[in-house]
Amino acid sequence: MLKEKVQEALNKVRPSLQADGGDVQLVDVGEDGVVKVKLTGACGGCPMSQMTLKMGIERVLKDTVPEVVRVETV
């Protein structure tokens, strides 16, 4: 159930990433609240990807799914 909530939240940020030629793929949601994602497309090699991850994706996920502790890339 937690994984579905996280996927729904990612679907909210996905259009913004896709507008810049990138995307995000959910890899895993741990019992400890750590979400692992893979940035793909233009986001995969972008020098601003860590800011996108922390200030964009992580913020939206924490606001939408309170169980999320942090988001990491793999």
Image: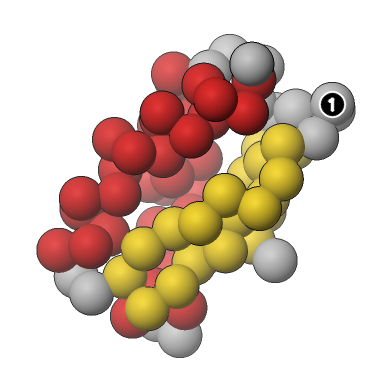
Colour option used: secondary structure
Judged from this view, the residue extending furthest toward the bottom is 45
Q: Using the rendered view, name the quadrant where residue 30 is placed.
A: top right
Secondary structure under the numbered disc 1 in the rendered image: loop
Amino acid type of the residue tagged 1 in the rendering: Glu
Q: Where is residue 15 in the image (x, y as percent from the top left)?
A: 20, 50
Give me the residue at 84% from left, 28% from top: 32
Q: Name the residue under label 1.
A: 31
Judged from this view, the residue extending furthest toward the right is 32
Res. 10 visible in picture = yes
Q: Position of residue 62 (x, y in %)?
A: 52, 25
Q: Using the rendered view, name the quadrant where residue 45 is placed.
A: bottom left
Give me the residue at 62% from left, 28% from top: 3
In the image, residue 16 above or below residue 20: above
Residue 60 left/right relative to 71: left
Residue 12 left/right relative to 34: left
The quarter of the rendered structure image containing the C terminus is bottom right
